[in-house]
Amino acid sequence: MRKLVFLGLALLAASPAIADTWTGVYDGTIVSTYGDGRVVKVYVNADHSYSIALPNGKELRGSWADADGQSCFTLTDPPPAPGAKPTCFPIKEYKVGDTFSGEDPTGKFTGVIQAGR
């Protein structure tokens, strides 16, 4: 019985936690390039907030949460348009070097996670 309990605890300790999808990005920058050539930088934080640096120098802010197999980013500042939906991605352990595609109200983009802020 002790061996079984120990094995179960060892497996739990070895399993990656999915509760914090963006842990590998907290010290990095997501560089998102849109179809029209526009580039924005996204900074994801451990407190479940994020910010977006726009090419014109303005900054957007919001929060992110994992639920129902999705990691969703919701704009809060400035307030989103009525009926606006969050931008969501599949839950996975994102890290420096990953690339992914997405779409938000301003268009389709490709994101690349780079080291450093």
Image: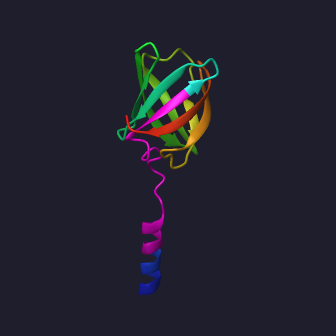
Residue drawn at the location 44% of the way across and 16% of the way down: 79
Image x and y of residue 54, in percent: 46, 18
**How is the structure coloured here?**
rainbow
Image x and y of residue 48, in percent: 39, 37
Position of the N terminus by quadrant: bottom left
Q: Nearer the viewer, residue 40 or 88?
A: 40
Is residue 27 within the magenta segment?
Answer: yes
Is residue 14 within the magenta segment?
Answer: yes
Image x and y of residue 34, in percent: 60, 23
Is 112 placed left or right of 78 in the picture? right
Q: Is residue 18 above or below residue 25?
A: below
Give the image quarter of residue 104. top right
Position of the C terminus by quadrant: top left
Q: Nearer the viewer, residue 65 or 104?
A: 104
Image x and y of residue 10, in percent: 43, 74
Residue drawn at the location 47% of the way across and 59% of the way down: 16
Residue drawn at the location 40% of the way across and 15% of the way down: 57
Q: Where are the magenta residues, as a range?
A: 9-32
Q: Nearer the viewer, residue 74 or 40?
A: 40
